[in-house]
């Protein structure tokens, strides 16, 4: 999945595409004095807000950062404390840290994580891969939606 991300998804993303909003009901990231801050969706709202590619990139960074923190025995990283890197460089950096952990860690070691009971690192690694896959699919869905909106008569990209 990472190879797919590196070759087909991440290189095509620039700031304009990342911040494109497909509707007025979106979760995105917003530049503030302390960096790019992510909206947190109200999952009870109807309809549920769409997300921008920037939000999805933030989510991948946050998810991996939080997981790495937990795997290393550190406290969880709350979503409201994680700032987006502003591009795709943050994902590359956190992926490198993840590879280093997986290369040296005991994959059977139990990890205090999101589940009620500790899970082996191999399970956590599998979950991270599924989450990455899901987020990449969502990024591509937004890219297709933007391309289709741009090609519609009278539509602004």
Image (tube, rainbow, N blue to C red):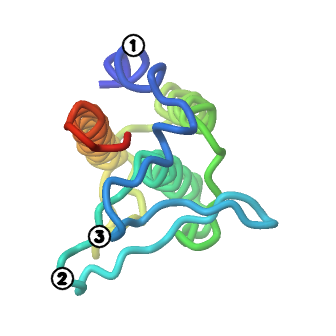
First in residue order: circle 1 vs circle 2: 1
| Residue 52 horizontal/vertical position (percent) | 40, 52
Badge 3 element: loop
Residue 7 circle label: 1
Is 127 left, or right, of 68 in this rendering? left
Kindly report which numbered mark, 1 or 2, lies closer to the viewer in this rendering: 2
The residue lying at 55 percent from left, 51 percent from top is: 65
| Residue 132 horizontal/vertical position (percent) | 33, 40
Disc 3 crowd, CA 10 A, few/some/many (<14, 14-19, 20+): some
The residue lying at 57 percent from left, 29 percent from top is: 92
The residue lying at 53 percent from left, 38 percent from top is: 16
- Mark 1–mark 2 contact, CB under 8 Å? no
Residue on which disc 3 sits: 49
Q: CA distance from mark 2 to mark 3?
A: 8 Å
Q: Image quadrant of residue 21?
A: bottom left
**Residue nearest the viewer, comparing 150 with 17:** 150
| Residue 146 horizontal/vertical position (percent) | 30, 39
First in residue order: circle 1 vs circle 3: 1
Relative height, residue 145 to residue 82 (above, below): above
Kindly report which numbered mark, 1 or 3, lies closer to the viewer in this rendering: 3
Residue 46 circle label: 2
């Amino acid at each position: 999945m990472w190879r797919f991300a590196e070759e087909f998804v991440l290189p095509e993303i620039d700031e304009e595409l990342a911040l494109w909003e497909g509707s007025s009901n979106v979760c995105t990231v917003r530049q503030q004095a302390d960096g790019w801050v992510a909206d947190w969706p109200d999952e009870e709202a109807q309809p549920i807000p769409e997300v921008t590619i920037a939000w999805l990139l933030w989510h991948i960074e946050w998810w991996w950062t939080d997981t790495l923190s937990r795997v290393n025995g550190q406290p969880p990283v709350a979503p409201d404390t994680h700032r987006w890197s502003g591009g795709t460089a943050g994902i590359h950096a956190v992926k490198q840290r993840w590879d280093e952990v997986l290369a040296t860690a005991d994959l059977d070691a139990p990890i205090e994580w999101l589940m009620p009971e500790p899970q082996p690192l191999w399970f956590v690694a599998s979950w991270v891969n599924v989450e990455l896959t899901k987020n990449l699919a969502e990024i591509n869905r937004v890219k297709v939606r933007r391309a289709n909106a741009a090609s519609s008569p009278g539509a602004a990209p």
